[in-house]
Image (cartoon, grey):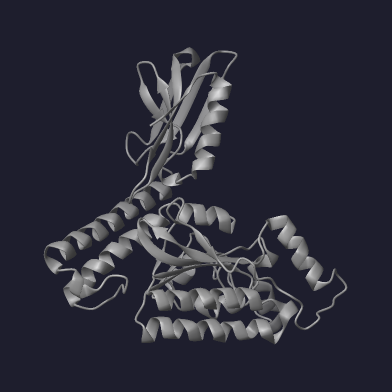
Amino acid sequence: MSSSDRIELSIDSGTWNPMDEDMVSLDPIEFHSEEEPYKDRIDSYQTKIGLTEAVQTGTGQLNGIPVAIGIMDFQFMGGSMGSVVGEKITRLVEYATNELLPLILVCASGGARMQEGSLSLMQMAKISSALYNYQTNKKLFYVSILTSPTSGGVTASFGMLGDIIIAEPNAYIAFAGKRVIEQTLNKTVPEGSQAAEYLFHKGLFDSIVPRNPLKRVLSSLGFLLVGTSSYLGRNLLSLFSSEQILFFPQGIVMSFYGIAGLFFSSYLWCTISWNIGSGYDRFDRKEGIVCIFRWGFPGKNRRIFLRFLMKDIQSIRIDVKEGIYTRRVVYMEIIGQGAIPLTRIDQNLTPREIEQKAAELAYFLRVPIEVF
């Protein structure tokens, strides 16, 4: 997933405000190799990916809560951390410190950028120092999200410094790669020992959360922290002063929303684990028949099969509900059957993806599109 797609998925629509977009890498150590020059490689990736560097930083809102967020992009030189990546993340941390904003960093990186030598390695200490001031001195809240792959200097620095560390399912997370370890130490790395699930069971992370319900989990944590702050009388989330929020009734309500949100997110995680709502749609224009298969919850309705005539399809409907739990679903209106969902709620598709899917299907079926 690109950093731009993840931004669209992670924060409220229309709230993204980028920072330091004009900052670009030079060639500080005049790195030369048998391949193309370092500066030419940077130019090539900028043209190909459409970004100036391997990280996007800025501010936005997470269900109405202002946050500072940095998202690395593995498509840009493997998400490697050079002087510009380090500087952008450091500036983001310092901005979040000054503005008392919660901080989210999404990691996707092969580690330090070798083309910049020790300048890339020093970014580890620079970012960690800024985070120390943010977390220890200012008592602010930092969430680290580890995606696949996260390795090298990113794992060894800010990737593992979050107050809460979340990994995506099946993510590859390591310091040194499997091949490097085996060639250096002459030892075999056990299969799966660098996977998120194995590392979670060893206690390295707080949770493993699929990307689709991740926004809901983060916003639920925010509500729960506000409620806990009001109960303890401590500013666990410095955006809100505990003195401004009475535990009864505001703190209790916030805690309820947070706990309910986490339960709802757990429910979504179960639906993903059991593939609830997944299956296939088969449209046979020659026979004029539509067949839909869906997986349900374990039990007698585990397998759901529907079959009806294409001429009974009235329209394709887009149902969009924005709010704490954003929902964007494509339905097919069938005479006598009602609305049948064609996408899963937990897919959390972007508006562009929803519109494209609905338009393609409506064009194929030659039916109108309705938006609710």
Instruction: State the residue at coordinates (62%, 86%).
Output: 122
Instruction: State the residue at coordinates (39%, 58%).
Output: 62
Residue 270 position in % (x across, y down): 36, 50
In the image, residue 275 sits, relative to residue 80, either above or below, namely above
Quadrant location, the C terminus? top left
Residue 43 shown left or right of residue 304 in the figure:
right
Residue 183 position in % (x across, y down): 71, 79
In the image, residue 324 sits, relative to residue 294, either above or below, namely below
Instruction: State the residue at coordinates (46%, 78%).
Output: 161
Residue 65 position in % (x across, y down): 35, 61
Residue 73 sits in which quadrant?
A: bottom right
Instruction: State the residue at coordinates (51%, 32%).
Output: 280
Residue 225 shown left or right of residue 315 in the figure:
left
Q: Observer-nearest residue: 302 or 90?
A: 90
Q: Observer-nearest residue: 323 or 166?
A: 323
Residue 247 sits in which quadrant?
A: bottom left
| Circle count | 0
Q: Residue furthest right?
A: 34
Is residue 175 visible to the viewer in this orientation of the structure?
Answer: no
Q: Residue furthest left?
A: 248
Q: Observer-nearest residue: 18 or 230?
A: 18
Is residue 161 visible to the viewer in this orientation of the structure?
Answer: yes
Quadrant location, the N terminus? bottom right
Residue 28 position in % (x across, y down): 75, 82
